[in-house]
Amino acid sequence: MSLSTMTNDLGRSGQKQTIVAKAYGHAPDGIETANATASKAFDAIAKFIPTEVLAPYVVVMQMVSSKTVPWSNHSVFWFFVLLTPLLLVLFEFAKAAEQHLNWPAVPQLIWRSFASAVAFAVWSFSVPGTPFLPGGNVVIAGLMAVLISPILAALDAIVMKILANKI
């Protein structure tokens, strides 16, 4: 999800706002295969990750694995985990300035920044060359996504509602 879309439901300072919780990753009735479940979990995780970070990460990890750059895959991973929330904050304030909106509510922005870093870390485990799962072990990455995505979605709904009442 793009940075702009990802933060549309953030409150703005000086405004009382009701946040409608987004439901992520709910399975339809019936039995699903493990691949379909993992795919839905990755889709749910991706809703928290700015798309502007995904492609550069894959490209840089490819460069690291081909030894085109002198960086380690650990340093690239942690750089992007830290870059994700920083970009979210930067672009949200830029969007508010461009569209002449009130500044974003900082507590909600902090939560979404944290959630985006966690989601990016989980998503990145599926990328070949990840430092923690050699070969981008998709089974383990899928399991992590299946476990984390509903927790992150539930926490998002709860935290955003609590923070919306405090703005």
Image (tube, rainbow, N blue to C red):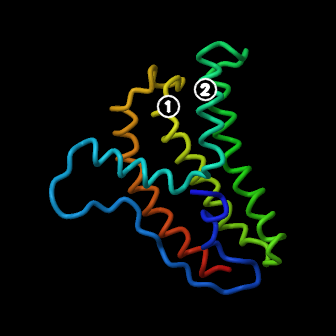
State how many labels appear. 2
Label 1 element class: loop
User: What residue occupies the far left of the structure in this picture?
Assistant: 30
Residue 9 at what x, y percent from top left? 60, 73
User: What residue occupies the far bottom of the structure in this picture?
Assistant: 16
Kind of residue indicated by mark 1: Val
Residue 60 at what x, y percent from top left? 65, 28
Q: Vertical placement of 26 versus 63: above or below?
A: below
Residue that carries the numbered disc 1 in the rendered image = 127
Q: Tell me, yes or no, whether the two marked residues, 2 and 1, touch with CB atoms within 8 Å.
A: yes
Residue found at x 43% / y 63%: 154
The mark that comes first in sequence, 2 or 1, is 2
Kind of residue indicated by mark 2: Met
Residues 87 and 74: in front is 87
Residue that carries the numbered disc 2 in the rendered image = 61
Q: Quadrant of the image for the N terminus? A: bottom right
User: Crowdedness of circle 1 by 10 Å Cα count: few (<14), some, many (20+)?
Assistant: some
